[in-house]
Image: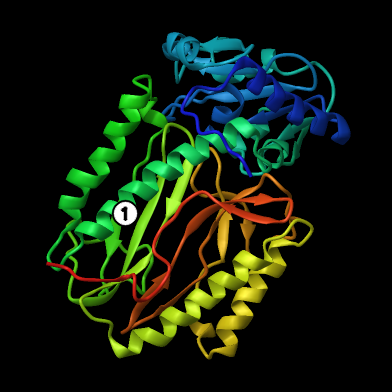
């Protein structure tokens, strides 16, 4: 599969194609429009990213014509600088504002006069109520985001290369006593510097760089980052957490590694995790359901007697975020299609021993997977000689 890396902003044609995908879904559902306040949906359809506080940002996607964006007056210039493609802007005075000048007044003007209105299933209740009983919960924008365009694959591939190269550097430099503060100040900062050198117009609101590590004391608890300067130690398992959004597109690469020695109790869980990863990689084929893939990995862990250590799904979608649907999880019946992008990360977590997880970002092809990230694969290669 040939993917051309890019860090350029989307073209007007790319944005028009995205809008057309959503509008086809609205037509099929018999909806006059759809309303979203989700920052990721808004970014995907407009190229506008912002920190959302108490001032609402609401995008109305009509069944025909340009999107309509309800924004505070404060943000008019900002929207104009960042958005790509046709966009009708409906500005309200402020939050709060006098009657007749509120966000709800402008939303009422942006909505079509008749017909049912789709609304994100996670749309805040106050916005849903403003639809006046015309709302129907559904998620056509998230559905349209599932299969990536060639442009999106190029953006994701670019971010995956930066993250993989940064991850390689971490493994080269890893040693007992190396702390999180050092990693952030060197490797994390380098990722940002390289991205800005390539594109000085990076939107800081669309950047979330994570270059984290966990040592064996906490790696059984995969989201435990309570120690802001956690130190690497002899042995392991250590787990890297390199999950980032780089100017609006996600990338993830993670590994379990050891320093100078491998505790005996860690050998079997490590190899069991590797086999589960292989099962997921080989199972991700067009036509299968994501639920079936997750169950195959979970069955492997259960067979090995380590099923109690499975506390999360085998992976998740990647796109304008680094964590989105669809999910490689029991309960997600989505049928796998070429062009979908996922993290592949089955893992197990054993208190007193540690966590065991690899993650790679992959794109589904007609006959399997194409990996966009890379890293060492074996216990031998991940037993590092730290100075």
Residue at 82% in and 29% down: 24
Residue lying furthest front: 2
Q: Position of residue 9 (x, y in %)?
A: 50, 22
Quarter of the image for residue 107 reads top right
State which quarter of the image contains the N terminus: top right
Visible residue check, residue 263: yes
Q: Is residue 219 toward the left or the right of residue 185 in the image?
A: right
Visible residue check, residue 41: no
Q: Is residue 382 above or below residue 94?
A: below
Q: Is residue 256 above or below residue 4?
A: below
Q: How is the image coloured?
A: rainbow
Residue closest to the eye, 255 or 292: 255
Residue at 75% in and 14% down: 65
Q: SS at mark 1?
A: helix
> Counting other residues with Cα less than 10 Å from the Cα at mark 1, is it few (<14), some (14-19), or many (20 or more)?
some
Q: Residue beneath label 1, please? A: 168
Q: Position of residue 110 (x, y in %)?
A: 68, 15
Residue closest to the eye, 154 or 350: 154
Residue closest to the eye, 113 or 46: 46
Q: Is residue 118 toward the left or the right of residue 359 in the image?
A: right
Residue closest to the eye, 312 or 136: 312
How many badges with numbers are in the image? 1
State which quarter of the image contains the C terminus: bottom left
Residue at 31% in and 54% down: 168
């Amino acid at each position: 599969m040939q993917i051309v890396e890019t860090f350029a902003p989307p073209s007007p044609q790319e944005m028009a194609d995205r809008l057309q995908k959503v509008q086809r879904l609205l037509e099929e559902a018999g909806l006059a429009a759809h309303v979203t306040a989700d920052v990721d949906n808004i970014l995907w359809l407009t190229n506008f990213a912002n920190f959302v506080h108490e001032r609402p940002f609401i995008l109305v996607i009509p069944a025909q014509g340009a999107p309509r964006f309800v924004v505070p007056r404060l943000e008019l210039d900002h929207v104009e600088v960042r958005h790509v493609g046709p966009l009708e802007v409906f500005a309200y005075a402020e939050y709060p504002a006098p009657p007749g000048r509120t966000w709800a007044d402008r939303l009422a003007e942006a909505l079509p006069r008749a017909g049912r209105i789709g609304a994100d299933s996670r749309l805040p209740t106050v916005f849903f109520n403003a639809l006046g009983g015309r709302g129907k919960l559904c998620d056509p924008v998230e559905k349209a985001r599932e299969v990536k365009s060639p442009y999106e694959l190029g953006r994701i591939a670019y971010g995956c290369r930066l993250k993989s190269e940064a991850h390689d550097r971490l493994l080269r430099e890893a040693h007992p006593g190396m702390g999180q503060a050092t990693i952030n100040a060197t490797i994390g900062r380098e990722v940002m510097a390289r991205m800005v050198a390539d594109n000085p117009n990076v939107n800081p609101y669309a950047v979330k760089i994570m270059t984290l590590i966990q040592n064996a004391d906490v790696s059984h608890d995969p989201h435990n980052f309570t120690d802001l300067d956690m130190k690497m130690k002899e042995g392991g398992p250590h787990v890297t957490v390199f999950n980032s959004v780089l100017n609006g597109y996600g990338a993830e690469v993670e590994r379990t590694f050891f320093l100078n020695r491998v505790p005996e109790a860690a050998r079997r869980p490590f190899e069991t995790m590797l086999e589960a990863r292989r099962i997921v990689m080989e199972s991700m084929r067009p036509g299968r359901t994501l639920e079936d893939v997750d169950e195959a990995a979970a069955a492997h862990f259960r067979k090995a007697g380590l099923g109690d250590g499975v506390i999360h799904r085998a992976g998740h979608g990647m796109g304008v975020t680094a964590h989105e649907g669809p999910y490689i999880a029991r309960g997600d019946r989505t049928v796998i299609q070429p062009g979908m992008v996922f993290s592949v990360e089955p893992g197990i977590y054993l208190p007193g021993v540690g966590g065991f997880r690899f993650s790679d970002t992959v794109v589904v092809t007609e006959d399997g997977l194409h990996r966009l990230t890379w890293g060492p694969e074996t216990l031998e290669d991940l037993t590092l000689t730290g100075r």
